[in-house]
């Protein structure tokens, strides 16, 4: 049943992307090299820069152990029409806020997968910010973001980095 849902969502994103492509100007295809400052747990006295030359640059940030939540931070050099990703080993309760909420995206989740797109064919514009905050139920040692897929105008798959896993202890 999950694979049928994935196929349906992929087709829907493609159709919405085609409609959006007619409405929007074609985004630049050039990716720019960006540097994001990685936020680490306050108890750790280090900061690192992440070099990213992809269309979508991601980081996991702001782990809140008492709320069992963390942010997905995104810097995108092209508009985004939708995305999905997995977080193996955690039980996702939901997601809230960020660019997804700001752009009225419909977001659903299973135990370890998040899927989000706009039924109104809205695009997340070029920019940066918290994509969403993930809320989970179990405390584990680290959180990793895998199986990441971002779609752009016309349903085109966008390039993205794989953010570093977030250590929780």
Image (spheres, helix red, strand yellow):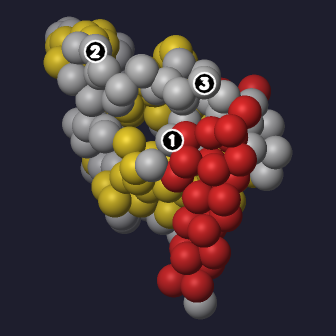
Between disc 1 and disc 3, the foreground one is 3
The residue depicted at 56 percent of the width and 66 percent of the height is 10
119 vs 70, nearest the viewer: 119
Q: Position of residue 109 (x, y in %)?
A: 62, 62
Secondary structure state at the residue bearing disc 2: loop
Find out whether the residues at labels 2 and 3 contact each other: C-beta distance under 8 Å: no
Mark identifier at residue 43: none
Mark identifier at residue 152: 1
Q: Determine which quarter of the picture holds residue 25.
A: top right
Mark 1 and mark 3: span between their CA atoms?
12 Å
Q: Position of residue 74 (x, y in %)?
A: 45, 26
Mark 2 or 1, nearer chain start: 2
Q: Residues within 10 Å of mark 3 (few under 14, many from 20)?
A: few
**Location of mark 2 (residue):** 32
Q: Determine which quarter of the picture holds residue 75.
A: top left
Q: Residue 20, relative to residue 53: is it above or below?
A: below
The residue depicted at 34 percent of the width and 59 percent of the height is 147
Q: Position of residue 83 (x, y in %)?
A: 52, 49
40 vs 154, nearest the viewer: 154
Q: Residues within 10 Å of mark 1 (few under 14, many from 20)?
A: many
Secondary structure state at the residue bearing disc 1: loop
Mark 1 or 3, nearer chain start: 3
Q: Position of residue 40 (x, y in %)?
A: 31, 20
Quarter that holds the N terminus:
bottom right
Q: Residue 116, relative to residue 130: is it above or below?
A: below
Secondary structure state at the residue bearing disc 3: loop
The residue depicted at 75 percent of the width and 27 percent of the height is 102
**Location of mark 3 (residue):** 25
Quarter that holds the C terminus:
top left
């Amino acid at each position: 049943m999950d694979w049928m849902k994935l196929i349906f969502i992929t087709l829907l994103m493609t159709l919405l992307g085609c409609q959006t492509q007619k409405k929007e100007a074609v985004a630049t295809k050039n990716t720019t090299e960006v540097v994001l400052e990685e936020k680490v747990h306050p108890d750790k006295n280090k900061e690192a820069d992440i070099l990213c030359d992809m269309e979508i640059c991601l980081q996991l940030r702001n782990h809140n152990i008492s709320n069992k939540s963390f942010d997905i931070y995104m810097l995108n050099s092209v508009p985004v029409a939708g995305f999905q990703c997995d977080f193996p080993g955690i039980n996702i309760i939901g997601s809230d806020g960020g660019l997804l909420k700001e752009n009225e995206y419909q977001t659903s989740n299973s135990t370890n997968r998040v899927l989000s797109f706009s039924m109104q064919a809205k695009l997340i514009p070029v920019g940066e910010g918290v994509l969403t905050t993930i809320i989970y139920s179990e405390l584990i040692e680290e959180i990793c973001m895998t199986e990441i897929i971002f779609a752009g105008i016309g349903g085109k798959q966008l390039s993205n980095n794989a953010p570093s896993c977030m250590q929780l202890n």
